[in-house]
Amino acid sequence: MTGSLLLQSLVLGILLGGLYALLAAGLTLYFGVMRVVMIAHAAFLVLAAYLAWDVNTRFGIDPLLSLVVTVPLFFGVGVALQRLLISRLRPASLTMMSVLLTFAIALAIEGTLGFFYTGVQRRIQLGYSGASFEVFGARIAVVKLIAFGLAAVALLALWLVLTRTRFGTALRATIQHPEAARLVGVDTDRTAAYGFGLGLATAAVGGTALSLDATIYPSLHWHWIGPLMAIIVVGGLGSIPGAAIAAMVLGIGQGLLQLPMGTTWAQTVFYIALFATLMLRPQGFFGGRLAQRF
Amino acid sequence: MRNVSRTLALAVGTIAVLVVPFVAPNAYILSAAVVVLSYAVLATSWNVMGGLTGYISLGHAAWFGLGAYGTALLVTRAGMPSFLALALAGVIVAAIALPIGIAALRVRGASFVIVSIALVLVLLLVFQSWGEFTGGSNGLVVPRPFPDLLRPEHHLVFYYLFAALLAVVLVVWWAFDRSRFGLALKAVREDEDKAQSLGVPTFAYKLVAYTVSAMFTGLGGGLYGLWFGDLDPIFQFSILVGSYMVLMALLGGVRHLFGPLLGAVVVGVAIEYFKMEFGDTQFHLIATGLLLGVVVLFMPDGVIPAVSGLVDRFRPQRSSIREVTADEVLDRDRVPETPEPTEARR
């Protein structure tokens, strides 16, 4: 194994890990504000990718521009989903039933995508699709770098919103202690709805980033949901730093294992990590004791 | 009185199941009936775990697929007789479910669901990639156990085999439901922490329920493999099959012996119909999604309680003077299903 090949897969792993981190952060956000495990996150990811593809093929404009529409759209859909569906579930069985409800949403989205776009595999052709440059012998595709940059910018924006705005403070208060947050005057219902919207907005960014470089088809979301779910369990349900670190570590692990094992078998690293985590530390590496109970 | 009507209903139901093949107009309807019965076996097996303990596994398709592939591989690679292979596959599935259960049952609720989904996805990955052993995406042909039977007769034999397996699973669920063991499992469903503090060995009991549930799902899968004769990882390890089991059990009612069976008849017939009418579109996915959403939102306890509640309205009330009895008030104010620990309440 040559050094440059190793560097190459390391770089690919980091680029992939960034995208995983963005999407896992969204999943963690839902769990934090609502105790909801959002199975449909990956389906919305694929939906955003399809919208980006559509914008590109129909109007011939850059898929990145579709973000102007999809981010606010997904935010609104997220708020509506939380307000109209998820908040209707009984509090006692919320966690369990939310899994089934979002699973149902995922199926409906996959079916709708199949209905409108058929099962044909799609790929965006861009002027810079084939472009790449070399760093110390490692070849990096421009589209992968753009996707990573998009993920990094979105994560940074998410972090700034969470730590620098009044809404972010209210959201973090709602996550930490909803009763206390209500006592000091936070409208936790509205905050939870906006938090849900924020999480779904990350799916819009992630989906657009994905569309630059991947072949998309309606059932693609099953391919993503496993690794993403594994990441949030390994990181500890509800912990955003935990999700980000687990995403990076597992993304790099996948990248490195692709050399000796091939792309398909490298996927198993997520599941091995998941089952190992359960045996060693069921609450995940950054989750509190609470994480084990959900 | 109640007992008599119950026995009568059971007898009528049994006879109805037994005569279906004789009123089925053609082989296609008969094969659809076999599919519905196999769904009933799966949903009832799922309910051994899901209904009694409240642990919702979206990944029981893993056991379905392992049972099917286990049986098929034992027949094709080891040259075993079909039904010996089926029994052995059931044992193997139980042996695999035990360590997986030890890992998966260390977490509750949503984490458990995530693990169950991950199980199906990783098995799909393994069975697709490990082509030289499992046949990979090319599929695996299972030799038919009765090679000289014609197609309709083949369906007929398997219809009764599935009916027999269903009867066994129903008896197992019923026996669990009435036993101390089942009581302990239901205590886990209502309040796991309290059950644990009262000295119920919750982990061991959950593990037993999980393993039994997995084994019967595996047997259902193995029988399906012998009947259908052609396996493909995409269909055997499908999240969709796992979600059908949950949907059927929830729709009928997880707290009732015949709930999953009822759900399997309703959903199974719907699935077969949708596949026949809209087979080439993705419409069945939308329909399944919508149905699951409606069940979760509007009748999480299932059809049986919803309907019996409706029937009770028109019955003469048992309470005479008071509008509601003290028991009913208690029942009404009770928090339904498992109360979460206090820190979880929003």
Image: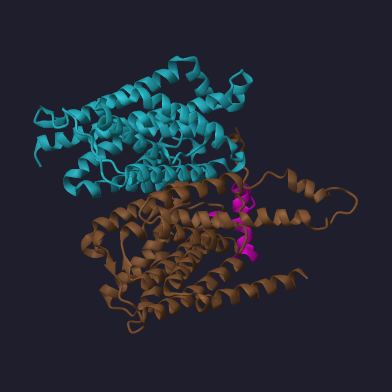
Chain colours: A cyan, B brown
Residue at 15%, 34% in the rendered image = A8
**Residue extent of the magenta highlight:** B176-204
A287 with respect to A49 (left or right): right
Name the quarter where the N terminus of chain B is drawn. bottom right
B340 with respect to A102 (left or right): right
Residue at 39%, 25% in the rendered image = A71
Residue B255 lies, in percent from the top left, at 62, 57
B31, A19: nearer the viewer: B31
B96, B298: nearer the viewer: B298
Magenta segment, prevailing SS (helix, strand or loop): helix
Name the quarter where the C terminus of chain B is drawn. top right
Residue B109 lies, in percent from the top left, at 51, 46
A168, B185: nearer the viewer: A168
In the rendered image, residue B182 lying in the magenta stretch gets the answer yes
Q: Can residue A126 be spotted in the picture?
A: yes
- Most extreme residue toward the bottom, as rendered? B148
In the rendered image, residue B224 lying in the magenta stretch gets the answer no
- Most extreme residue toward the right, as rendered? B321
Q: Specify the quadrant of the image occupied by residue A110.
A: top left
B263, A223: nearer the viewer: B263
Q: Can residue A273 be spotted in the picture?
A: no
Please tell me whether residue A89 is drawn above or below residue A136 in the rendered image: below
Residue at 61%, 64% in the rendered image = B257
Q: Specify the quadrant of the image occupied by residue B153.
A: bottom left
Residue B170 lies, in percent from the top left, at 56, 69
Q: Specify the quadrant of the image occupied by residue B120.
A: bottom left
